[in-house]
Each structure stands twice: as structure tokens, then as C-alpha cells.
Image (spheres, helix red, strand yellow):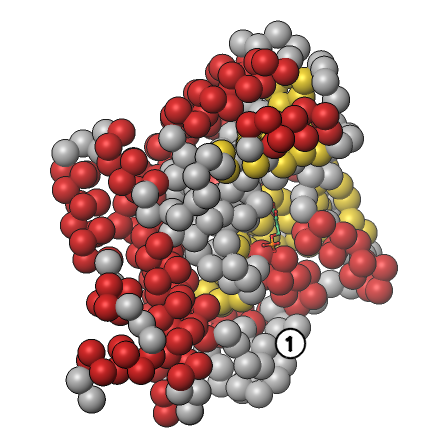
Amino acid sequence: MPASRRRFLLGLPAAAAAGAWPAFAQQVRAGIRAGEGESFWRMVKSQFPLEEGLVYLNAANVCPASRPVLDRHERYLRDFQANPSFQNREKYVGLRERLRGKIAGLLRVSPEEIAITRNTSESTNVVVQGLDLKEGDEVVVTAHNHPSNLDSWKVRARRVGFVVRSAPVPVPAGSPEALLQTIERAITPRTRVIAVTHVTNTAGALYPAERIGELARRRGIFFHLDGAQSFGALEVNLRAMGCDSYAASMHKWPMGPLEAGILFVKAERLPGLWPSMVTAGWSEQLSGARKFEVFGQRDDPRVAAIEAAIDFLDLIGMPRVEKRLRQLVSFAKTELARIPGVNLKTDLAAEVSGGVVKFALASPSIKQAYDLLWRQHRMSIAMTAAGDAAGLRWSPHIYNSPEELERAVAAVRSLA
Ligand SMILES: Cc1ncc(COP(=O)(O)O)c(C=O)c1O
């Protein structure tokens, strides 16, 4: 059947079917050669069909997907729904394996060590449920871990009888050494697992993963890292970090489809980690981390669309993404710190912070400020009402412009 007829039957516009990707890729490469000025970033921003006037500063929660991701998702969704036969769906097996290879490449590990899951929560819970732990063992967490990496351990501890020790978190963190010390002090001869967050969603602290990895390795402790706030934001080299497992979501900083995630498990740790879900497709012979992604029927078009998000990051390049992100965040932190009444909970120093900014205001109240910023400035942010990380959270990404950050700072200045 001619391609045009196939496209007609699938209801695809010609541009989406042919893919606007080659033209975009060409523009990106030309922009990089020209030194990626503001016009380059405007072109990147134009790939996100965000509502006009919306100042979206909530990457730490959910990122918008780029046009290439939306196009690819739509294309596969229509293809799947037009022909759900086993024969047509066979290709998704190959697409998933190609995707696994690309994710592994980005994180500098082997494809055998990557599972494609539904989100960070699920990936972390695979580790929580899958490790052999017994009464008397200890698991070190921090009070700023996300519930998927905190309450999950506590619930399992109630069943098994192990102890969950919570390391305190200084706010702001101060230095990598300060964070490392809190973990080191919580370790005892009974510690079997250290489970921390690479960049916290609470106060934006960047934990020194490599040094914690070293500490864990020397003592034979399993080291799990929650990478929900680092994957797609910072350059992540899992081999260098030395963690045993790493969990992340595609719908946050990687700007991929919703409800898609990854789990890395180091090759040596694979045999010792049990799968928590077993169904059709399971086999003792299933190789590598694939044993953690046997969930029954998957949303194949969504999984296939993840590849476009990885291609997008790869094309721009993670060092460039991180550099841009840090420029935006650094501007925001420096300007916010100058406003009387603003109390920054995230460090200015890059060695102990990432893409998340948290700050409190002397007045108005957190909730009032949050509501005013939305109502008067259409600024989409997050807030924490109480506790040591109470305040407003900004998490900009490469689709934000310096002008948006300037407007956001001016809006806070008008409130404070
Ligand atoms: C540090 C951290 N871990 C885990 C999660 C959970 O992510 P998901 O809901 O995609 O599983 C979040 C979500 O905000 C997070 O910030």
C-alpha cells in the first residue's frame, strides 16, 4: 500500500507521519554550531505547545512533552488502535529493546541493567519489595525522601521487622560534606541498605551520590538512589556514581510521556533482587532487568514514544541541558536572595543543588503567595505548607526563558 494511502487510513497528517524531526534536528545542530544563543533556546522552547502566558515552573512535578514526543506518541497510538493484531504489535518488542539501549547509553550503563517501568514510585518499590531483608537489619533513609522511598520502607519494615533509620537533612544543605556526614552517622554494622534522593524535591539538595556510593561499596551496603529530580536535568553517569539501583520518571525532567519510568539495577545485584510482579511473559530465562517489567499488557505506544524524549535530550546534549538549567536556576536564586523577607532553602552553590529552588517569604503566607502568583501572574509552581522545607518551589527547565524568570522574580518582589 502506498505510504500516502496508509497515512490516510491511519488519519495522520502528512507532517506528523513524515515527522518534523529531521528539520528540527537540523536546526538544533546548526544552532549548536552557532554557539546556542537565546535564539537557539527560543527555537527549543517553540517545540513545547505550552499555553500562551503560562509561566510553567513545575518540572519537578510534571514536564510538558515536546512536539516530537507528542507526534511519536500519537503516531504509534493511531497505528496500534488501527491494527491491534499480534502481527502489527510485534514491532513494539524491537522498539522497546532499541529504547532500552538508548536509555542505557544516556546513563552510561548496560541495556541489561535497565527496566522500563511506569514511574519512579514503581521502580523504587521494586527495590523495596525485592531485597531480601530480615529482622534486625537496618535501612538508612532521609526525612526528605519522597514517600515512595520512605513510607514504602516503613510499611515493609512492619511486615519483616527490620529498622528504618532516618538521617536528618540540613536546610539549606550547606555542603556535600554536611550531607555525607548525616548518612555516615546513620550507618551501623547492621545497615544493609542506604536509600536516598539524588536531588530532593523538598529543598532541592543535591546529595553527593559518588561519595555515598563509595561509602556503601566499602561496607557492602546496597545503595538505592531516587533519581526523579536528576534524570533529564543533570548529567547522570550511573557507573561513576556507583549506586546499585536508580529510579526515575520519564514525565518529569526528561519531558517524555506520562506514566513511564525507568529502573536501573547493577548487573551484580540483579540475581539478588526479586521481581514483585510476575505474570504472562515471565520466565526464569528472562535476561537482565527485564524481569522487573513483566506487568501484563503494557501501553506499547507510550513506551515507544519514550524514545523521542531520549532522542530529544541526546540531540541537545545533557551537558548543554544541565548548563542551561543551571543558568536559569542560578539567576532565580541570586535574584530571590536579594529580596528582603525571602529565605532561600536551596543552596546557591551548584555542588549541592540542582534544578529545584525552594524559598519562603516572611509574608504573605505560603498559601496566599502561591494563590496570588497563580491568579495574578499565571505562574504554575508548587508549595510545601509546613515543616523545615515549607515554602514555594520553582523548577524551571529548558523550555523556560530568562524573561519568564525575570517576570517571576518581579512578581515575588511585588508580594514580599
Ligand atoms: C524525589 C521524588 N521521588 C519520587 C517521586 C515520585 O514520582 P512518580 O510520581 O513519577 O512516581 C517524586 C515526585 O515528585 C519525587 O520528587
* Residue toward you, 149 or 60: 60
Give how far across and how far down residue 379 sits, in percent: 55, 32
* Residue toward you, 325 or 245: 325
Residue 104 seen in render: no
* Residue toward you, 82 or 111: 82
> Which residue is drawn at the image coordinates 59% and 35% (left, top)?
381
Residue 62 seen in render: yes
Residue 112, picture quadrant: bottom left
- Looking at numbered disc 1 in the image, what kind of residue is underneath it? Met
Q: In this view, does 90 lie above or below 167?
A: below
Give how far across and how far down residue 214 sits, in percent: 52, 43
Looking at the rendered structure, the secondary structure element under dot 1 is loop
**Residue identified by numbered label 1:** 277
Quarter in which the C terminus is drawn: top right
> Which residue is drawn at the image coordinates 78% and 30% (left, top)?
386
> Which residue is drawn at the image coordinates 56% and 78% (left, top)?
294
Give how far across and how far down residue 329 sits, in percent: 46, 27
Q: In this view, does 340 lie to the left or right of 213?
A: right
* Residue toward you, 136 or 128: 128
> Which residue is drawn at the image coordinates 75% and 22% (left, top)?
365
Quarter in which the N terminus is drawn: bottom left
Q: In this view, does 363 lie to the left or right of 233?
A: right
Packing grade of label 1 (10 A; few <14, some 14-19, many >=20) is: some
Give how far across and how far down residue 167 sits, in percent: 72, 37
Residue 118, picture quadrant: bottom right
